[in-house]
Amino acid sequence: MFKNALKKLNPLAPDGLSSPRSGFLFPSTDPHVDGEECLHDCETCTVHYPRRFQIEETHQIYGNIDKWTRHLIVATGKHDWRKHVEDEKGSVTEAVGWWKDEHGSKGDRLMLSASNIPLPDAPDAKHISTEESVAEQQEHGTVCLLLPSFTLLSGVTPDNVTKLLSSSWFRASAKTTDALRPSDVNDRKTSVATPSPRSRSTSTPISPNAQHASPSAPSPSTPPTSPGLPGGITATPYPHDYLILLCSQKTRDARCGQSAPLLKREFERQLRPLGLYRDLDDDRPGGVGIVFVSHVGGHKYSANCLIYRTARAVGREERWRDEMTGDVNGKSVSQTKTDETPGDLLQGVGVLDEGAGSEAAQCIWLARVFPEDCENIVRFTVLQGKVVKPARQLRGGFDRQNGLVSW
């Protein structure tokens, strides 16, 4: 009984990491610090869900997600998939699903998502069928985004997936339970060609003193090398500092198919005035990428929204806080948030000139997200790592900088 009482007071995840209550995983907004705006939904939002859009509103949702150590997002060029993406015959997702069944473990879980990231050689990604997508993956290969390492893997095919996931490169890639390298916060050109060696003990808490090899950036004039990867696969840094994942899988739940496009439209409206919006073809460094993904679980709490934030972005929070509440180039950010605002509002304050290469420090998993929430999610969650409605929306996530997880 005494041990159970202690566990309730100071709970630990199975791997020894701190697993705090919802109010302590990520900070919440405070009107005394963040202003009264954090208490109010967007008043200029013109995007709304259908009138009959209804979700579950009574359950406590914090902590009801499974542990994951890595997240593999597969480019398919589509925004909807078979009910189970592993059932798309001959696809990369099928091959990953097979590998997970044969070699995966609950203690080292790989989360798999199909995505609308375009296939590299697809002629018309907007109207690609499942058969065409699979054929492209088999013939030319596809791109996969690996998180939390924020790495783009090119040349992945159904035939080389097993070699990729069993490779020394993959085993050395970052995990959600790994310590965050302190240098990642200010590292602008971190190479992902040679992942840093990391401790593989699952019983050791995240330690800021963990030893890591010093990475070196490849020369821009030469193609990246990828020691430890199967032949034909190359690794390059994902160029953006933030990534918003929206579940869009209509075959699992119609609400996901309805909500994702509407949320993307509103997120885009909020990000463009800040010069931070990046579409799927925009590889400019920095900014926020928005990607549609397959079922992540909990569709009755639609919309699910996973926000990955790089270590560099986390190290920039105080600067963003000052800029979002003060003046930028002589103008208040809140006063310039219109569709006509130039996208270079924040040029010159060091926000848009960062290079690629930083790993993800955090993932903030929200649910019950509505279009009117998007403004404050951008202002406070994406840019500052704060949760506006923790009791209603926070499902969990991880914070590698502070050694915290929700599972």
Image (cartoon, helix red, strand yellow):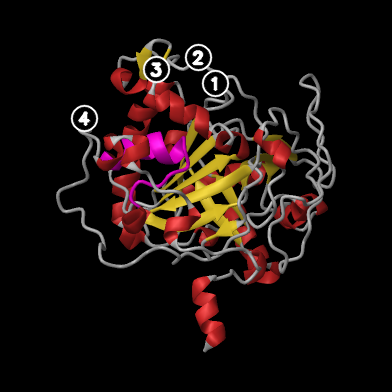
Q: Nearer the viewer, residue 332 or 352?
A: 332
Q: Which mark is residue 327?
A: 3
Disc 2 + disc 1, Cβ < 8 Å:
yes
Looking at the rendered structure, the number of numbered marks drawn on it comes to 4
Q: Report if residue 342 lies within the magenta region.
A: no
> Which residue is label 1 attached to?
352
Distance Cα–Cα, label 3 vs label 2: 13 Å
Q: Secondary structure at mark 1?
A: loop
Label 2 packing within 10 angstroms: few (<14), some (14-19), many (20+)? some
Label 3 packing within 10 angstroms: few (<14), some (14-19), many (20+)? few
Q: Nearer the viewer, residue 121 or 391?
A: 391
The amino acid type of the residue labelled 3 equals Asp
Q: Residue at x 65, y 29 (%)?
A: 356
For marks 3 and 4, the one nearer the N-term is 4
Distance Cα–Cα, label 1 vs label 3: 17 Å
Residue furthest left as drawn: 51
Q: Residue at x 25, y 40 (%)?
A: 372
Label 4 packing within 10 angstroms: few (<14), some (14-19), many (20+)? few
For marks 1 and 3, the one nearer the N-term is 3
> Which residue is label 4 attached to?
44
Q: Which mark is residue 347?
A: 2
